[in-house]
């Protein structure tokens, strides 16, 4: 009984270590990515395997018929800029690439820290102030958004993401006072089939509308379906925190299966094949997501594929539609490419906010995130919001904590007598255990009283941890003084040191283990955790410092009350 608190702490430390190991699985050493031009890949292997589909070939682009052949233009890059996005559209397939999130720089300049370093004669490290790049044409970081049309058997091949489109302009800019920007691409085959691919951008939005209009000017009906997919290589965040690992890979949502992850290993082992109405498919990483969202009332087939050179595809294709001669049909879809801001994502598609992943504790994490937002709306600072949430959680568990601290205080009071008893019955362990239990009964001390309330609170603490890790609003959010980025570690390690000091003070208020070896190990915990927390984001360490401080105040008050009662 006297060792249960020590066992609980060691178990919790092992749980933290196992969580860290699990994160490493997602970010373990990856095979080197072959340097391959994404535009020279096989034209069939990265297309969805729609039943009866006709995959285009290079020859199909230039097949001749009774209608004079249409000249195939050379591909070019179109530059598009809005108030929040800067990207490129390759006319080879209308593929979206090199998409920069203008309001989210890779790193943040901390002028206060730089000034202090100058005063101390320390070197000032240069920050990468370039915007975060989500889609990337660099083969080592390849990430593309592709779309196109697959013709059913019996119909002429249509425009896929390997087809070269025409564009009237080389650049498009959302001008001041302009709310919508459209980028049209056109393609015509030798039989008179005309495809117009239209991208629509809106001010302040990370949604990109896609419309693929098929105008059938041929003498025969055309049947086909649209597809939209994301292709990327395994992602490695060079600037990421070594101790904070989050999921990167494929995800999808259906009404039947809800939110599901499909990591790169899953794609390599087996191709996904799910038929559903509505839903969406995407690729996510820490803080950001790219998701294709088909019409909610449309039946789609979700799929994944592993390609050569460590490339992976996740996407969806629609049911076939027939376009009669001299008629047209429009296929539509939406692409979201931006930060995982939950209120914004809830308005875009059902279940999209689940890409902010709190794991099996989502039912606890979402209310905590809501509370964090409510406090931020009042105080306007995410650091004070963390402090406010910590205070609210402490108030919620005040009675449980009070019971725990009272039990610990009583244990601390009888600690000298237990130590004396242990020495008296050093050679008679059964007698010692019996006398110890009798003392617990006489003093009305429950040895489990200090542990059970803590166990009940652990899921809430873990949920709060994941909320602080996953919330993009905390990324590069300032607090005060030198803490100008709550998602980065404290540049001067002040908060981790304070965390170690508060942990040591809190430890001194608790009864020490009777066993001397356990007591020595316990004394090492503040040092070990201080070193561990040196590399944690400042927002997480701030939570622990505030939580420990509030616990010290509460525990000191309860201990003083018990001493006065005695």
Image (spheres, rainbow, N blue to C red):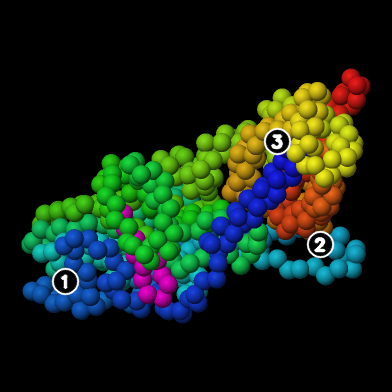
> Magenta span has 486?
no
103 or 267, nearer to the observer: 267
Q: Is residue 457 left or right of residue 49?
A: right
| Among numbered discs 1 and 3, the one appearing first in the sequence | 1
Residue at image x 36%, y 44%?
A: 257
Tell us which disc is closer to us: 1 or 3: 3
Q: Are marks 3 and 2 in contact (CB under 8 Å)?
A: no
Region in magenta:
302-313
| Element carrying mark 2 | helix
Position of residue 34 measured from the top left corner of the image (x, y, whole percent):
46, 79
| Among numbered discs 3 and 2, the one appearing first in the sequence | 2
113 or 87, nearer to the observer: 113
Structural crowding at the residue carrying mark 3, measured as other residues with C-alpha within 10 Å and reported as few (<14), some (14–19) or many (≥20): many
Residue 383 seen:
no
Position of residue 90 measured from the top left corner of the image (x, y, whole percent):
39, 69
Residue 418 seen:
yes
384 or 497, nearer to the observer: 497
Residue 535 lies, with reference to residue 170, above or below; the image says above
Residue located beneath label 2 in the image: 114
Residue at image x 85%, y 60%?
A: 115
Residue located beneath label 1 in the image: 190
Q: Is residue 201 left or right of residue 277?
A: right
Q: Quadrant of the C terminus?
A: top right
C-alpha gap between disc 1 and disc 3: 77 Å
Residue located beneath label 3 in the image: 451
């Amino acid at each position: 009984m006297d060792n249960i608190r020590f066992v609980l702490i060691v178990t919790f430390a092992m749980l933290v270590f196992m969580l860290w190991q699990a994160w490493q699985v997602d970010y373990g050493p990856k095979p080197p990515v072959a340097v391959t031009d994404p535009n020279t890949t096989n034209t069939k292997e990265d297309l969805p395997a729609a039943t009866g589909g006709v995959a285009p070939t290079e020859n199909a682009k230039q097949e001749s018929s009774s209608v004079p052949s249409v000249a195939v233009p050379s591909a070019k890059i179109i530059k598009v800029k809005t108030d929040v996005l800067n990207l490129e559209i390759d006319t080879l397939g209308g593929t979206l690439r090199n998409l920069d999130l203008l309001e989210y720089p890779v790193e943040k300049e901390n002028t206060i820290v730089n000034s202090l370093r100058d005063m101390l004669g320390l070197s000032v490290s240069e920050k990468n102030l370039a915007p975060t790049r989500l889609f990337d044409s660099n083969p080592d970081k390849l990430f593309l958004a592709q779309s196109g049309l697959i013709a059913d058997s019996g119909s002429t091949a249509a425009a896929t993401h390997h087809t070269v489109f025409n564009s009237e302009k080389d650049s498009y800019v959302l001008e001041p006072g302009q709310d919508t920007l459209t980028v049209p691409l056109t393609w015509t085959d030798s039989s008179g089939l005309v495809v117009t691919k239209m991208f629509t951008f809106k001010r302040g939005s990370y949604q990109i509308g896609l419309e693929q209009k098929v105008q059938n000017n041929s003498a025969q009906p055309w049947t086909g379906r649209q597809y939209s997919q994301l292709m990327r290589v395994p992602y490695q965040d060079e600037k990421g925190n070594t101790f904070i690992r989050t999921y990167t890979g494929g995800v999808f949502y259906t009404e039947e299966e809800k939110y599901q992850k499909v990591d790169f290993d899953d794609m390599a082992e087996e191709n996904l094949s799910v038929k559903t109405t509505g839903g969406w498919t995407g690729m996510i990483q820490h803080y950001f997501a790219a998701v294709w969202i088909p019409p909610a009332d449309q039946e789609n087939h979700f799929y994944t594929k592993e390609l050569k050179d460590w490339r992976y595809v996740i996407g969806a294709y629609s049911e076939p539609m027939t376009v009669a001669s001299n008629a047209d049909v429009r296929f539509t879809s939406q692409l979201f490419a931006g930060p995982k801001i939950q209120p914004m994502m809830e308005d875009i598609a059902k279940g999209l906010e689940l890409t902010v992943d709190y794991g099996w504790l989502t039912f606890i994490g979402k209310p905590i995130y809501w509370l964090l937002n409510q406090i931020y709306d009042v105080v306007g600072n995410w650091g004070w919001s963390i402090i406010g949430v910590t205070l609210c959680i402490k108030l919620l568990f005040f009675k449980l904590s009070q019971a725990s601290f009272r039990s610990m205080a009583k244990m601390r009071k009888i600690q000298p007598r237990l130590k004396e008893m242990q020495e008296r019955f050093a050679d008679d362990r059964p007698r010692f255990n019996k006398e110890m239990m009798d003392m617990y009964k006489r003093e009305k001390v429950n040895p489990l009283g200090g542990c059970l309330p803590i166990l009940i609170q652990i899921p809430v603490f873990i949920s709060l941890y994941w909320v602080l890790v996953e919330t993009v609003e905390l990324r590069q959010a300032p607090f005060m003084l030198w803490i100008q980025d709550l998602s980065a570690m404290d540049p001067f390690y002040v908060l981790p040191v304070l965390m170690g000091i508060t942990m040591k003070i809190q430890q001194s208020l608790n009864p020490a283990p009777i066993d001397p070896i356990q007591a020595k190990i316990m004394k090492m915990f503040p040092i070990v955790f201080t070193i561990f927390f040196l590399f944690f984001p400042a927002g997480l360490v701030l939570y622990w410092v505030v939580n420990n401080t509030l616990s010290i105040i509460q525990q000191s008050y309860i201990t003083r009350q018990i001493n006065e009662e005695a």
